[in-house]
Image (cartoon, rainbow, N blue to C red):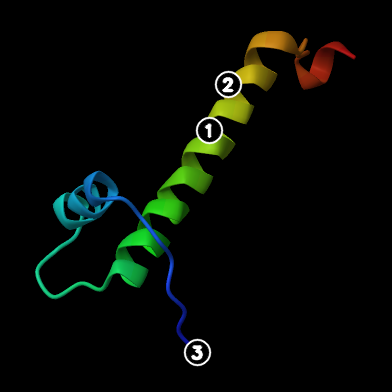
Amino acid sequence: MTTTIAVNEKTRELLQIFGHKGETYDSILHRLMEIAKMYQFYEQQKTVLKNEKFYEVGSL
């Protein structure tokens, strides 16, 4: 099933820049969302490492 989403011209141009020859907008968006999920996970891990206290296993 396909659907139409409205994007402005600048967004369309950016999608074309991030895409590869012959790649659909759906594929580009999917790939970018996967990258965004990885980045979000990375940022969450940085926060944990910055704010949490860690102990060596043998020291407990």
Residue 54 figure quarter: top right
Q: Which residue is mark 1?
A: 42
| Relative vertical location of residue 40 with respect to residue 58 in this rendering, above or below | below
Mark 1 neighbour class, 10 Å CA radius: few under 14, some 14 to 19, many 20 or more: few
Q: CA distance from mark 2 to mark 3?
A: 38 Å
Q: Which residue is mark 3?
A: 1
- The three-letter amino acid code for the residue at tag 2 is Lys
| Relative vertical location of residue 31 with respect to residue 56 in this rendering, above or below | below
Q: CA distance from mark 1 to mark 3?
A: 32 Å
Indicate which disc, 2 or 3, sits on the residue closer to the N terminus: 3
Camera-side mark, 1 or 3: 3
Front residue of 21 and 4: 4
Indicate which disc, 1 or 3, sits on the residue closer to the N terminus: 3
Front residue of 51 and 56: 51
Where residue 31 is drawn, which disc sits there?
A: none
Residue 29 figure quarter: bottom left
Front residue of 54 and 24: 24
Q: Secondary structure at mark 1?
A: helix
- The three-letter amino acid code for the residue at tag 1 is Tyr
Camera-side mark, 2 or 3: 3
- The three-letter amino acid code for the residue at tag 3 is Met
Mark 3 neighbour class, 10 Å CA radius: few under 14, some 14 to 19, many 20 or more: few
Point out residue 21 in the picture as x, y percentages from the top left corner.
9, 69
Q: Which residue is mark 2?
A: 46
- Please tell me which residue is depicted at 14% across the width and 63% down the height of the picture: 20
Q: CA distance from mark 2 to mark 1?
A: 6 Å
Q: Are marks 2 and 3 in contact (CB under 8 Å)?
A: no
- Please tell me which residue is depicted at 53% across the width and 33% down the height of the picture: 42
